[in-house]
Image (tube, grey):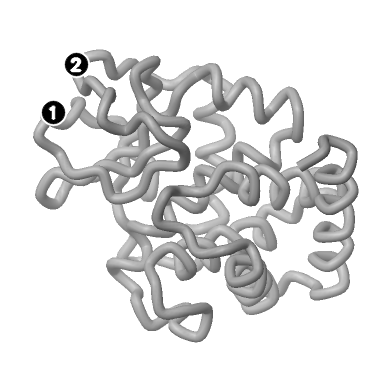
Amino acid sequence: MLLAVLLPLSAAAEVICALGSGASAYNAASDQRPTPDAMEVARRLNTAFTSICSPKCPQIAMFRNTTAANAMLVLNGDDAKLVYAPKFFQSIDDTYGDGAVIAVIAHEFGHALDEIYPARFKNAGSTQELRADAWSGCALAKVDLSPADLGGALFALAKYPSLAHPTWALRLPALRTGYTECNGEGAKFDNGVDRSKRQAALSGR
């Protein structure tokens, strides 16, 4: 199971990836159980990823925390958790749809999956961030988003990178690699890219 309900990890845990700034302000003592909506999205991802990573899927706890950066994967020894800022998830869901939340969670899960299966998307790029993007693309294919939700997902990933992310020009092929290698149609992905570009133009980004 990718998603597990575990006790909060200690404050000394290492932040593997944080989408957005502010990770240094994170206080693990403020971790709370995720909202039902966030849990439902995580369950959808759990179903999508289990068919790929079984029988060796990582266990990742999930928490909401007002002190967190937008979304973070935190590691403490062999234990991992995804922590998200509730206002961030609410904002991207309201603005870009469920696909945006799915894509963000999938990227963070992708870091954990890359640790177990580093060769799975080695053709997506030489960095962990690009391979995590490929896992996110794979999840978007497995969940089978609508064209509108796919466009929103891609736009959200582009708008909220980690500080370690390379340029979008490098990330987009990695996402497409994951999407098509997990049986997603290339034409549908490209349509989602076009939709995300239109969203970017409308937002002035």
Measured as percent of width and height from the top left, residue 91 is found at 65, 22
Residue type at mark 2? Ala
Q: Nearer the viewer, residue 52 or 92?
A: 92
Residue beneath disc 1: 11
Horizontal relation, residue 8 to residue 185: left or right: left
Horizontal relation, residue 119 to residue 184: left or right: left
Binning the other alpha carbons within 10 Å of mark 2 as few (below 14), some (14 to 19) or many (20 upward) gives few
Compared to 81, does 132 lie above or below? below
Please tell me whether mark 2 sits on a helix, a strand or a loop.
helix
Measured as percent of width and height from the top left, residue 72 is found at 37, 39
Compared to 7, does 168 lie above or below? below
**Residue located 74% across and 70% down the image:** 184
Residue beneath disc 2: 29
Compared to 84, does 18 lie above or below? below
**Residue located 36% across and 67% down the image:** 114
Q: Which quadrant of the structure image shows residue 189?
A: bottom right
